[in-house]
Structures are given as C-alpha cells and as structure tokens.
Image (spheres, grey):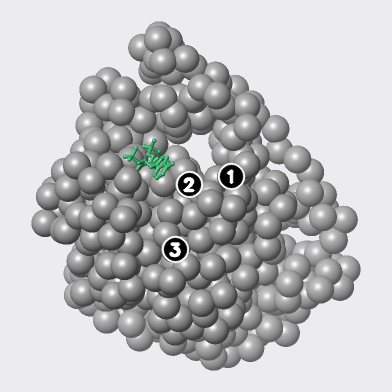
Amino acid sequence: MNIVLLGFMGAGKSTVAAVLAEKLHISSVELDEEILALSERPTISAIFSLDGEDAFRRLETQACQTWGLVSPVIVSTGGGVVERSENLDALRQRDALFVFLHTSFSTLQERLEGDSTRPLFQDVEAAKALFQKRLPRYMNAADCIVDTDGKTPEAVASIVLDEVHRLTGNRHKTLQPSAMVQACTCPSVPSATTEVCVIWGDPVSHSLSPRMHNEAYRELDIAEKFVFVAAQVQAQELEQAWAGARAMKFRGITCTIPHKQAMMPLLDELDPLAKKVGAVNTVVRLSDGRYKGYNTDVEGVVLPLKERIDLAGKRVAIVGAGGAARAAVFGVEDAGAEVLVLNRTLEKAQALAEEVGGSAYSLQDADVVEGCDVIVQTTSVGMTPHVEDSPLPSSVLRPSQLVMDAIYTPWETRLLQDARKAGAMVIPGAEMFVYQGVAQFELYTGCSAPVSTMKRIVSESLGGTWHVKREGGL
Ligand code: NAP
C-alpha cells in the first residue's frame, strides 16, 4: 500500500512525506518529479508558462497513470491533482490511501505570502477562491483528514501514522508493518538539540507534570525535541535558578509554590491576564530569546467550564480568595460571567471582588450560592486527609448547577459528592490540572496537546475515573 498526501500548496506535503519516509524507511516522491520526467521542460513553472495549465494537467494525469515507482512509497502530490477525477482514480488503482493535510487558509497565507516561487499566491483573493473550490474535492477524496495548523511536520506525520494504523488495522503487509511498528514504538531519546522544560517549586517531588508532559511528547512523537524535568528550588534560590535557566536557554519553566508571584518581576514580558491574576505558572522562551510569563491556571478553570456551559451572563460563585481563586475570578470574568467571591476572611473576598466589579460574601452567607449557575471551589478545605470537610453546606447545592473543585486529592471531594447527590454536574480538580497543563504544553511546543493521553496519565497517577456523562442535573 502507498500513502498519497493531498493538500493545497503550502500544506507541508513534501516535508511531511520526507518525515514519514524516514520513519518508515521507505522512499518519498514528488508527483511533480514524475511530471518533469515526462516533459522536456526543466521546471514545473516552465511547463505552466510555456505550454499552459492544460498541458501541465495532461502530464499530471499521465504521471498518475504511468508512475513506475516501486511500492510502498509516500507520494506528495501537487495541489491541483484533485482537479481531475481520473488522477485520483489512477492513483487509487495503485493501492493508495489518501491523506488530506488540511491547513486553514489564514495559515497558508502566513506561510506563502511574498513567496515569489508561488505565483498563484501573488493574488490572495484568487488563491482563496481556488482554495475554496478545491477544499470539498480534497475532503471527498480523503480516506482521512489531518489538521496541520499549529503542528510541526513531525507531529503531523505521527498523526498520519496513527490514522493509517486505524484505517488499515495493521493489515497492510506492503507498507512494511514491522518498520511502522518500530517507528511508532521505538522510544526517541533526548539529544544535543532537545529543548528543556522544567517545573520548579518546593516541594516538587510529588509533581505529576513531568510524567504528563513527557508522555504527551511521546504520544506526538516529539520526545526527541522536548524533555520535561523537575527541580527543587527553594524560595531563596529562585534568582540563581533563573540565571541558570536563562543562560541554558530553557524552553519553558513551570512555576509552582512558592515561586508563582516571585517570578513575575524577573520576566521580560507578562501576558495581560497573568498580570491581572498577579501570578505566573508558565514561562516560555520566545523566538527572540526573551521570556514571557503566563498563568495557565486560568485555562485550567475556564476550559473545563466552557466545555459544558457558555459562561457569558452566568452567575459564578468562586469560593476562596487565594491564588487559585484569582485565576478563576479573572478567567470567568473574562468569559463574561458575573462573579461572586465567598471567603473565610471577608476582607480578602471584598478586595478580590472589587477588582472585577463582583460581590463579596463571607462563608457564613453561603446561602447566596443557591442562586448561582456555577460554583468553583478553590480553598484547601476538603483536601486529603480532611476528606469529610466541605466549605459549603449541602443545602445550598442545586441540580441545575455546575460545580468544580480545584482540589485533586481526593479525586472527588466531599463538596463534589454532595453536589452529585443533589443532581448537579461536577468537575474534579484533576481536570483543572490537566487543562492548565494542556495550555502550557501548547505554549512550550506549539503543538496541539494530546488531551486524552494527558488525562489518562493523571487518572492513572491519582487513581480516579473520568465521568464522560453527567449523572442527573442540567
Ligand atoms: P492559597 O492561595 O493559600 O489560598 C487558600 C484559600 O483557602 C484561601 O481563600 C483561604 O481563606 C482558604 N482556606 C484555607 N483554609 C481554610 C479553612 N480552614 N476554612 C476556610 N477557608 C480556608 O492556596 P491556592 O494556591 O489558592 O490553592 C487552593 C487550593 O487549590 C489547594 O487545594 C490547591 O491544591 C488547589 N489548586 C489546584 C490546582 C489544580 O490544577 N487543580 C491549581 C492550583 C491550586 P483565607 O483567605 O480566609 O485564609
């Protein structure tokens, strides 16, 4: 069996074909080379300009029909191969599996604008019209579609291999399954060019982040490019550690207690939301070598909520007024929610609520929660070993509510158990942990994070279960 890559110009077909060929220890070819072999012209542009597009298309069809390459092979096609159905029919007869590398037009535009070797892109509107005309043809022809936006060629190739495995159930003898299996399972190890990411804090030895990130690198087959380690750094050692990390050009620094605030003045740039929250948990080296700080605890809270509910206009009660509460308050306010802050120390709740024009309550006034759509619990009440404690009485919980707890040991706190009994939808703190890591992974690597792998690592490590469906409630 042969793998044929389809896609618009600039989708990365040639590069991905080369990566795939290397992984599988087989050849990759450009269909354009086959076309040139059939022509007397020295280049594809010369065929276009001297003989016209029709002549080029005829040669392209001929190349699809007569290509004499030895299978298995990875074929990178020209963007216009879908213009003629006989091209696809001819390739199909060569036992081809079609993979469409889908790239958004805006990404293609970024990649190709100003590239004089791509005359079709000199007129962006015409290129867009062509893209829109061809898109359904790629979709119809494809056995599988792989989204390439924001992914490295290695990550795309890895997904293509997974898709090929999935579609063929490993039965394709001609694609040298042993080589494929080897390519997929052979652990890639760090090298001299590997980018280093670190989590530092004190204590840090309990951290799940190294395992979660390293498994995710392996899943995307980028473990040769990135490695994630942990370092115990005490409060008074922070500046020394920072000087070292900077000199060694670490790619990413995950900051945990006690460094989330102390890192801020050391950085070159701060994400506006991190500035508002007043803490960073993620530091990334930018392409110009400067370091920028983010707070992905915000995504940790907001993404799981947004997966289940549109936060705009909802009443959201944040319980607590510490670091996790700040990420929650600014995150949900940014998503358009009305914020109520409840805290043991009322003054702290008032100060935080004031920053977002929300209202503040003491934990004694927990009844106010009854009228809220969402509750985000961010105090340490209910954490192991005090698993019978809850900051809210069960009487304030309603079936229509969505209740999230930042605590992830135990997996399901007393509050979440009470909420579930009341018929509400619940989100365990482990999900917040996964999603802060997902946002961090994407900042460090530029790749879409393999969320299900990261969830698996966290549930395996904490001994919890992800409930796909809610039980009762909304
Ligand atoms: P923090 O800044 O120290 O804040 C602690 C909060 O808990 C404060 O609001 C404090 O109220 C309240 N509190 C502590 N003991 C209490 C008690 N006995 N009764 C009532 N309220 C009490 O801590 P944090 O960094 O925000 O962390 C809070 C929790 O979130 C921890 O369990 C942490 O593990 C969890 N967390 C989870 C994630 C995740 O990814 N899932 C991320 C970050 C944090 P006062 O203001 O009155 O002292």
Tell me how many marks there are.
3
Ligand 1 within 8 Å, label 2 CB: yes
Amino acid carrying label 2: it is Val
Apparent side of residue 95 relative to residue 325 in the rendered image (left or right): right
User: Residue 173: percent from the left, percent from the top?
Assistant: 88, 68
Quarter of the image with the N terminus is bottom right
Amino acid carrying label 3: it is Pro
Residues tagged 1 and 2 counted as in contact (Cβ below 8 A): yes
Mark 3 or mark 1, earlier in chain: 1
Amino acid carrying label 1: it is His
Quadrant for ligand 1 reads top left
In front of the other: 162 or 237 = 237
Residue 126 visible here:
yes
The residue wearing badge 2 is 381
Residue 339, image quadrant: bottom left
Mark 2 or mark 3, earlier in chain: 2
In front of the other: 148 or 308 = 308
Question: Residue at 47% of width from left, 15% of height from top?
Answer: 234
Query: Mark 2, residues whose alpha carbon is within 10 Å: few (<14), some, or many (≥20)?
Result: some
Question: Residue at 71% of width from left, 69% of height from top?
Answer: 164
The residue wearing badge 3 is 393
Identify the element where label 3 is drawn: loop
The residue wearing badge 1 is 386
Query: Mark 1, residues whose alpha carbon is within 10 Å: few (<14), some, or many (≥20)?
Result: few
Quarter of the image with the C terminus is bottom left
User: Residue 242: percent from the left, percent from the top?
Assistant: 39, 16
In front of the other: 173 or 93 = 173
User: Residue 281: percent from the left, percent from the top?
Assistant: 39, 36
Question: Residue at 44% of width from left, 63% of height from top?
Answer: 393
Residue 435 visible here:
no
Identify the element where label 1 is drawn: loop
